[in-house]
Structures are given as structure tokens and as C-alpha cells.
Image (tube, helix red, strand yellow):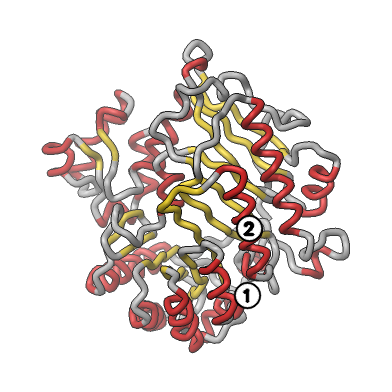
Amino acid sequence: MAQLPQGQPVPADGSLPPWVGDKPDCLRASRFSVYVHVPFCAVRCGYCDFNTYTATELGGGASQTAYATTALTEVALARRVMDVAGLAPRPISTVFFGGGTPTMLPASDLVRILAGLRGSWGLTSDVEVTTEANPDSVTPQSLRLLAAGGFTRISYGMQSAVPHVLATLDRTHNPDRIGDVVAWARDAGLDVSLDLIYGTPGESVDDWRRSLDAAVATGVDHISAYALVVEPGTKMGAMVRRGLLPMPDDDDEATKYEIADAALTAAGLTWYEVSNWARGGIDGPHSCRHNLAYWRGDDWWGIGPGAHSYLAAGSAAEDTGMAGLRWWNVKHPLRYAEALERGGSPGAGRELLTSDDAALEQVMLGVRLSEGMAIDRLSDAGRGAVAGLVAQGLIDGHAAIRDRRLILTLRGRLLADTVLRSLT
């Protein structure tokens, strides 16, 4: 499982540096989002290194049944911390329940957490509220309860439509169920997204086409497609290391990305982030506004074990060189619950971001979007690299010259890491 980053200690009460809390200057155009981490899964997938736990791994020390109450304790703490810092409450624009499998919790618990967020901060009139789910973790009734409780969107971990590929990934759902769960969610009034993974050992190009065709056939308005990454601490990582599975091939994954882009574009979905396509594109009604909040540098608060948070600095930071604060919670659900029971913060560490740090992150995130970023926001060295990237076909030359914006071509999306190294 991935390790938390190194950082400075978080104060026991979770208090924020004074330069984060100078208001109202900091209440600028930036919106406010909340991420809720639900760390429970029925089965740990062999490729997964997220902060998730099965009942066996948790033992008797952390209670799934009490999790909603524990998370709401952190919500109340977060509101107190913001009040002490002088941060006037902003209504929440987006909420994302991730995991893990959030729908391992009863729908009533998820709705109760959302109600707590509404009571602490308020929700905007057009709030987007998403939960991730496995196809075998929902019912028509649970989806209706989520929609009635304020959820607007669900993201299913489909991954593949091919049984042998799902077996390699240790996914437990029946691929034939995808059409049903999409229809149930739509009948409940929820917008639906499907997540796919390409590059699984043993997956042929025809297998990948079959998965894309199956996803498109459901009629969903948003599809994410991610290249498989074999992490060293996972079951799959161990199997690759022992020679039981081959490492995913870069050329194979590039071919499959091109196939995905062509198929999804033909189906009326437009790429708006390197791994995401939606009907209507980046500012249409079906893009994931919560993820866009991350990529565009908005503020967010993370609730749950291992969750990260970010707040931008206010005007009092001008003399300090600080641009923002990021912090993260302890990973294990038991330690997380114990910290909150003691009345303290579950924070494990934090990072004070300088103006240079923030500028670098803006490049790393902004370049991934279809809207790109203004070339004038690059460093001198970054601006100097643009002409070469255009010549290599990685950057859209017309956008660079006409609009002074840096936008990736299809080839640039395939080599996004190379582009970023050149720009930073």
C-alpha cells in the first residue's frame, strides 16, 4: 500500500497557519469541495495500492458500522478549525465519496454523511455529489435512496467487459451486470460514469475493443480510461516480480489509448482530461466537476483515513512566500477513529507550499486538461521549450500561436510526462 508523504507535524488541534486564515481576501473565486474517503472493500484487488481494507485486514479494531459517525466527527472538527482560522463558511460545490468502495456502507449512512456536510458548510444549488461503486455493491433501492438523499452522480468501476481480464484484476462482478446497474442509476435520476483499465496482462487489443464497445453501448455520458500501473507493494506487483505475470507493455498501452480516444470520440464523448471523456466536454453537464476542482487548483477538505486536503493562502501570505497548505490524515481507520475520539485532529503531516511549488503544480495539473493553460504562466525555461514541443507534434501549434495557450495533441497526451519534464 502506498506510503503517506513526509511532512511537518499537524498541530494536535488541527489548527491552520495564520496566513491561510486571513479572510475575506482568501474567499476569492476559488470554489470549495469535499472528498470523503470510505476505506472498506469486500475484496482487495491485486493491482490496488489505495488506502483500503477488507474485514479480515481490519480485524475487530475498526467498525464499519460506526464509520459514518466517525466521519461526521471529523466534519465537525473541520468546521471548528475553519471557524477559529477566520474562514467564513463557503457552500460546497462538489462532494466525492471515494475508496475503497463507498457503497459497502448502507445508502442511509452515505446520505447521513452528506447531510452532515450540508449542515456544516451548506451546499451550492448546483452541487455535484458523486459516489464510486462496484457494480455488485448496489441495488435499485440503494440507488433510489442515494438520489433522494442528494447524490447526483455515480462512478462504477467497470474496468473491463472480459471475464479473464477481470479475473486477472481480481474483480468480482459479473460484466453482464453493467447494463443493469447503469439503467438502475439512470432510473433513479443519477448521472453515470464508467471507469475502465487497459493494459492488463493477457488483455488483447480485441479484448480492449470489446470493453470499449460494451461501455459505449450503455449510453453513459462519461467514461474514464486508465493505463494499468503495477505498484510494487501489491499482489500483482509480486506476481510480476516472480515472473508469473508480464509487466504491461508501453507500446501496447499507447495503442489502446489511441483506440479508446477514437472509439469514445466516435460515440460523441470529448476528451477533457488525459484519461477522461464526457459528452459536452470540459464545461458540459457531464464532466466530473470534482476532479476539475483538483486540476484547477480549488480548495478542498478531505474527510477520512488517509484523505488529503488543500487550502490556498490569503493575502497575509504575501510577505511569507507561502501559497497554500496541504495536509493528510493517518491511514489506518483505527488510528483515525482513536484520534477523533480523543478530540484531536487525525492529521498525520502537512506541507507548506511556496509560490514556486504552487506554480509547478499548476503546470503539472493544467497541462492535462483540454483547455490547457496560458503559456505566460510558464517559467522562462518552460516558455523556451514550447517551440520544440510544437515541432515534435506534442503541443497544438495553432493554440500556442493564436491563443497563447498550451494544449496537448493526441501524441502529446500519450507522452504527457515527457511534455511536463520539458516544461518544468
Residue 181 in the image: above or below residue 389: below
The image quadrant where one finds the C terminus is: top left
The image quadrant where one finds the N terminus is: bottom right
Quadrant housing residue 279 = bottom left
Task: Point out residue 238 in the picture as x, y percentages from the top left corner.
Answer: 67, 66
Residue 270 in the image: above or below residue 327: below
Q: CA distance from mark 1 to mark 2?
A: 23 Å
**Pointers 1 and 2 in contact (CB under 8 A)?**
no
Q: Residue at x 29, y 70 (%)?
A: 264
Kindly identify the amino acid type of the residue bearing the numbered disc 2: Phe
Provide the secondary structure element on which disc 2 rests.
loop
Q: Toward the viewer: 73 or 296? A: 73
**Residue 167 visible in the displayed image:** no
Kindly identify the amino acid type of the residue bearing the numbered disc 1: Leu
Horizontally, residue 316 falls left or right of residue 236, namely left
Residue 394 in the image: above or below residue 187: above
Quadrant housing residue 57 = bottom right
Provide the secondary structure element on which disc 1 rests.
loop
The residue tagged 1 is 244
Tag count in the figure? 2
Horizontally, residue 381 falls left or right of residue 17, namely left
In the image as oriented, which residue stretches furthest toward the right? Answer: 60
Q: Toward the viewer: 422 or 219? A: 219
In the image as oriented, which residue stretches furthest toward the bottom? Answer: 176
Q: Toward the viewer: 100 or 104? A: 104
The residue tagged 2 is 50
Q: Residue at x 24, y 35 (%)?
A: 386
Q: Residue at x 55, y 35 (%)?
A: 89
Q: Toward the viewer: 122 or 319? A: 122
Task: Point out residue 337 in the picture as x, y percentages from the top left corner.
Answer: 80, 50
Task: Point out residue 281 in the picture as x, y percentages from the top left corner.
Answer: 28, 58
